[in-house]
Image (tube, rainbow, N blue to C red):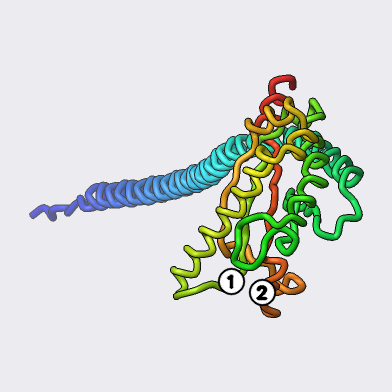
Amino acid sequence: MRRKIKRYEDDGNNYMFSVGDLMAGVLFIFVLLFLKEYITSDKENYKKILKEFEIISLENKKLKEMEEEFKKLKLLEEEYEKNKHLREIVEKLRLENEKYKKQDVVIENIYNEIEKKLREAIKDDEYVKIDFERQELILDNRVLFDSNEYLLKEEGKNALRRVLPKFFATFIDDNTIISYLEQLVIEGHTDDTGPGNAEEKYLYNLNLSQKRAFEVANFIYSDRILAASLGEKRLKKLKIYLSSNGKSDSNLVYKENNPKLGVDRNKSRRVTIKYKIDVQKIRKELKEVE
């Protein structure tokens, strides 16, 4: 009986299994390497994207800052335009002010000329005073009228004959002054005394002051001596400018110009002749030649 020789057939199969395992291992390693590369690559992309995002964010921040700066510049520009407009207004006002100053000099020169002429014409008269600030001739009531009377005393008539021709000539005889004269107003003033209550006292003094002012105006045209001193031409011109009214006790004079010291009744009772220059006419004429 032959002994069958048993062959070893498992060597081939064992070899094939080992190669498969090896291939699987290689594939696994490849997959790992791929994943590593992918992850590494993805991480780099992430970093790159993050960097780009940071750059974009920074650019956006810069854009916002630029936008804010632009807004500020816009506001500054608007403010500049406003200021420019204001500067133009200020400059215009400055120029107008300069013009007014020049006009004021001319007006002041006219008043100075009037003051100079009046000082030369009327001096050393105890019953007459000139207030150059208020632009008025003040006639002491004591020489003109008796208490509560409106008819001129003889002494008062003489005072008017002596003073008024020189006073009116100052305005009428000067061509420059007369061209700018607006009005001459005779005003009667009383003190704060009188009959009745406050309203009755006011009306009584108003009536008395009006009568006294009119009495002076009437005397200027009715007295032959005064009319002769003034002359027909002056009297004719006076009609254009002269008027009269009563002020009652509305413009009282106080002792030492202090209301706390009480009313100076002697000085409050008076007749004044106010002179007024037409300032607007002067300004208009000067403006036309500028």
Q: Residue furthest left?
A: 1
Q: Disc 1 on helix, strand or loop?
A: loop
| Left or right of residue 72: residue 169 | right
**Looking at the rendering, which quadrant does residue 269 occupy?**
bottom right
Residue placed at 90% from the left, 51% from the top? 123
Q: Is residue 142 visible?
A: yes
Q: Disc 2 on helix, strand or loop?
A: loop
Q: Nearer the viewer, residue 15 or 152?
A: 152
Height in image: 216 above or below 280? below
Lower sequence index among marks 2 and 1: 1
- Give the image location of residue 224, x and y in percent: 73, 37
Contact between marks 2 and 1 (CB within 8 A): the answer is yes
Disc 1 target residue: 192
- Give the image location of residue 235, x and y in percent: 70, 31
Instruction: Say the numbered circle drawn on residue 284.
Output: none
Height in image: 286 above or below 275? above
Residue placed at 74% from the left, 20% from the top? 289
Q: Nearer the viewer, residue 209 or 64?
A: 209
Q: Nearer the viewer, residue 31 or 203?
A: 203
Look at label 1 and name its amino acid: Asp
- Give the image location of residue 241, x and y in percent: 65, 35
Q: Is residue 90 visible?
A: no
User: Is the C terminus in the top left, top right, bottom left or bottom right quadrant?
Assistant: top right
**Total tally of numbered discs in the picture:** 2
Look at label 2 and name its amino acid: Val
Instruction: Say the numbered circle drawn on residue 263.
Output: 2
